[in-house]
Amino acid sequence: MIWRERKMNNIFLLFSIAALLALRGFMGAGVRSFLTKNERKKYHASTSRIDRWFFWSVPNLISDRYSKSEKRRISYASTLKAYRVINLAAHIGLTAVLFFIVCYFAGYVGERVLNTVCIAYAIAILLMFVVLAVIELGMNQRYHLARYRNKK
């Protein structure tokens, strides 16, 4: 029975880490697309890895730009601030899950509490992906409208 519980916790731990990396990868790809090649080089040269991982200073480096395809000004700085908050929330959630897994194996919390924390984290990650999808749809409205219109 204990082996099965550890296996489930290991599976959920791997899922949690993979979900965090997928979320972070999506946001990292967005940052990469927002910056020009020269801005990217300057950003990598002037900031530390931890700063880049948590998006601390990137909103200060990029400004709002006019998009020819969208025919409007897009607020990249606001988007990057949202990325920073989402990334920080995902890391805090993963830390809480790790804390509760350690507490579970130490005998401080029960299986029911651990399951509740794990389900709450999975729901939070899902909501973070939904927020990122809404941000993406808001930033590139014309592109997505044209894309869906061509599929009919």
Image: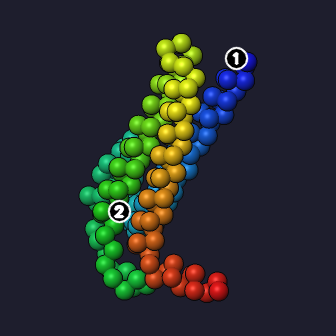
On screen, residue 38 above or below 106 = below
Which image quadrant for residue 110? top right
Residue drawn at point x = 49 percent, y = 14 percent: 108
Q: Quadrant of the N terminus?
A: top right
- Helix, strand, or loop for circle 1? helix
Residue drawn at the location 40% of the way across and 83% of the way down: 70
Residue at the disc numbered 2: 79
The kind of residue on which mark 2 rests is Thr
Image height check: is 53 above or below 139? above
104 up-or-down from 44: above or below = above
Determine which residue is flagged by label 1: 2
State the image coordinates of residue 51 (x, y, percent, origin top left).
Answer: 35, 45
Examine the image and state in which quarter residue 95 appears.
top left
- Assign the C terminus to one quadrant of the image: bottom right
Q: Position of residue 74 (x, y in %)?
A: 33, 74
Report crowding for label 1: few under 14, some 14 to 19, many 20 or more residues within 10 A (C-alpha). few
Under mark 1, the amino acid is Ile
Is 115 or 19 nearer to us in this picture? 115
Distance, label 1 to label 2, CA atoms, is: 44 Å
Residue 56 tag number: none
16 left or right, relative to 90: right
Nearer the observer: mark 1 or 2; the answer is: 1
Q: How many marks?
A: 2
Q: Secondary structure at mark 2?
A: helix
Camera-side residue: 105 or 143?
105
